[in-house]
Image: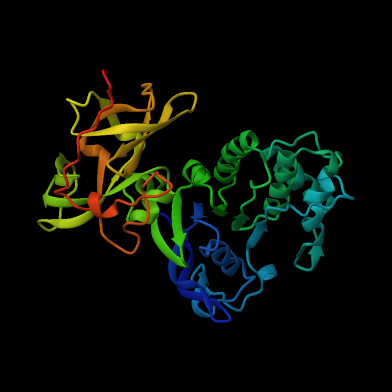
C-alpha cells in the first residue's frame, strides 16, 4: 500500500488582496510521480513553492511524514528543486557541478570523504546517462545534457522529494519528448518522489502516476492520466486535457442522452430524468459515415493534414466540432457521424458549462444549439459518399 509522504491541508495563499490558492487539500505518496497541471496563473507553481518552503501559506498546514513543516526553511527540508533555468556553475565541469552540494554536506560534524563523493557522483552520472562527461565544460553541453547535470546535482544529495518547475520549457519538441521518457525512468530508478509543474498536457499524460488539474487557485480534479482523460469532472478539465467537443445534452434515462434533438446511447448513469448535462466527445471517437447513415449531419468547414490523420472542423448548425480521421473530406462536404456509447461522456452542469468545446472563433448560435428541439435546415452541399 502506498505511503503518504506530503499533505497540504486547507492551504490558501494570498498576495495582497489577490487569492492565488483557495483552500487546497492534497496528499502526495512516497515514490510517486505527481504532476501539477494547469494554465498560467492557476496556482500550480505557488503550490510547488509552498511544498519547497519558499512560501508560507496564508492559512492551512503542510505536513511532511506527518510532521507540520510550515515554519521549516527550504534548506532543512528533504527536498531539492529544479527550475526552468538550471543555474549550473559555468566555471565548474560536470563532475564538480554534481559534487558541489556533497562537498558542503556534513555527517556527524564531518565532511564526506573524497571516495564517497566520487562514488556517489559517478553513480548519479550513470543514472542520467552522462558517464564519461565528468570533465566536460558545462557551457559546451547541449540543453538536454545541461538538464541532466541539473537533475544529477539535485538527486545526488538523496532528497526524499524532487520539485521540478517546468524544467523542459527551454528544450525543443523532439528533445522534450526524449527527456519525458528519461525523467520517468530516472524517477522509477531512484524511487524518489517527483512533483512536476507544467502547463503541457502531453507531458503530464506521458510521465505522471497522478495528475492534479488546477484552475483559478482550485483543484479541479485529481486522478491517473487515464481517469483524467477518459472521465473528466467538468468542462474545464475536458477541454484542457486533450481536445474535446463539449455540447449541451439532456439525459432521458440511464444510458440515453439527447444531443441536437437526437438520442444517443451512452454508458453513464445516475442522472435525473430530463436533466441538462454537458456531453464530452473526443475527436478520435467520432466515426464519419454518409449523411443517410449518420445520427447527425454537418458540413466540413476546414481540414488540416497532421501526417497520420486529418483534423477536420465540421459545422453542426453553428457549433463547430473537431473530428480526427484518416478519411479525406474536402471543405464543403456534408457528412454524417456515428458515436459508440463508450465515446460519449456525460458531466453535470457547472461553473465552466458553456465556456468550452466550440472550435469556431465565434459562435452566435448558442441559443439554437442549446435547444434540443431545434431542427436544422436543409443545406445544398456535396455529400460524403464513404
Q: Position of residue 161 (x, y in %)?
A: 59, 58
Judged left or right of residue 282, residue 54 is right
- The residue under the point 15% across, 51% down is 251
The furthest residue to the right = 91
Does residue 184 appear in this view? yes
**In the displayed structure, would residue 358 be above or below residue 294?**
below
Residue 316 vs residue 183, the one in the foreground:
316
- The residue under the point 39% across, 55% down is 236
* Number of callouts: 0
Residue 27 vs residue 272, the one in the foreground:
272
Residue 281 vs residue 51, the one in the foreground:
281
Q: Position of residue 72 (x, y in %)?
A: 63, 75
- The residue under the point 44% across, 56% down is 213
Q: Position of residue 128 (x, y in %)?
A: 68, 40
Quarter containing the N terminus: bottom left
Judged left or right of residue 301, residue 185 is right
- The residue under the point 81% across, 50% down is 97
The furthest residue to the top = 385
Q: Position of residue 165 (x, y in %)?
A: 62, 56
Snapshot quadrant of residue 313: top left
Judged left or right of residue 184, residue 369 is left
**In the displayed structure, would residue 121 be above or below residue 9?**
above
Does residue 339 appear in this view? no
Colouring convention used in this rendered image of the protein: rainbow
Quarter containing the C terminus: top left
Judged left or right of residue 385, residue 155 is right
Snapshot quadrant of residue 243: top left
Amino acid at each position: 500500500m502506498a505511503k503518504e509522504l506530503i499533505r497540504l491541508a486547507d492551504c490558501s495563499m494570498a498576495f495582497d488582496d489577490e487569492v492565488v490558492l483557495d483552500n487546497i487539500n492534497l496528499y502526495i505518496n512516497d515514490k510517486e510521480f505527481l504532476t501539477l497541471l494547469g494554465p498560467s496563473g492557476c496556482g500550480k507553481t505557488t503550490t510547488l513553492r509552498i511544498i519547497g518552503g519558499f512560501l508560507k501559506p496564508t492559512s492551512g498546514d503542510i505536513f511532511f511524514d506527518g510532521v507540520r513543516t510550515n515554519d521549516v526553511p527550504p534548506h532543512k527540508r528533504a527536498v531539492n528543486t529544479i527550475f526552468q533555468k538550471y543555474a549550473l556553475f559555468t566555471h565548474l565541469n560536470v563532475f564538480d557541478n554534481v559534487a558541489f552540494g556533497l562537498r558542503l554536506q556534513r555527517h556527524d560534524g564531518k565532511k564526506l570523504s573524497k571516495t564517497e563523493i566520487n562514488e556517489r557522483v559517478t553513480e548519479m552520472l550513470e543514472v542520467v546517462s552522462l558517464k564519461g562527461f565528468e570533465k566536460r565544460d558545462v557551457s559546451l553541453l547541449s540543453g538536454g545534457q545541461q538538464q541532466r547535470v541539473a537533475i544529477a546535482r539535485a538527486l545526488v544529495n538523496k532528497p526524499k522529494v524532487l520539485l521540478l518547475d517546468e524544467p523542459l520549457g527551454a528544450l525543443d519538441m523532439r528533445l522534450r519528448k526524449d527527456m519525458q521518457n528519461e525523467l520517468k525512468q530516472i524517477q522509477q530508478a531512484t524511487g524518489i518522489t517527483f512533483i512536476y509543474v507544467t502547463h503541457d498536457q502531453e507531458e503530464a499524460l506521458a510521465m505522471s502516476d497522478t495528475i492534479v488539474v488546477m484552475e483559478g487557485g482550485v483543484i479541479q480534479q485529481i486522478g491517473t492520466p487515464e481517469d483524467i482523460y477518459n472521465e473528466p469532472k467538468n468542462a474545464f478539465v475536458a477541454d484542457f486535457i486533450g481536445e474535446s467537443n463539449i455540447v449541451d445534452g439532456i439525459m432521458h434515462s440511464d444510458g440515453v442522452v439527447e444531443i441536437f434533438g437526437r438520442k444517443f446511447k451512452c454508458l453513464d448513469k445516475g442522472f435525473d430524468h430530463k436533466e441538462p448535462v454537458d456531453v464530452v466527445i473526443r475527436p478520435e471517437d467520432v466515426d464519419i459515415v454518409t449523411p443517410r447513415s449518420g445520427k447527425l449531419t454537418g458540413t466540413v468547414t476546414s481540414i488540416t493534414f497532421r501526417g497520420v490523420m486529418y483534423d477536420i472542423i465540421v459545422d453542426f448548425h453553428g457549433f463547430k466540432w473537431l473530428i480526427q480521421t484518416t478519411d479525406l473530406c474536402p471543405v464543403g462536404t456534408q457528412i454524417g457521424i456515428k458515436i459508440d456509447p463508450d465515446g460519449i461522456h456525460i458531466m453535470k452542469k457547472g461553473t465552466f458549462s458553456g465556456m468550452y468545446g466550440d472550435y469556431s472563433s465565434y459562435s452566435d448560435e448558442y441559443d439554437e444549439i442549446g435547444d434540443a428541439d431545434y431542427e436544422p435546415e436543409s443545406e445544398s452541399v456535396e455529400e460524403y459518399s464513404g
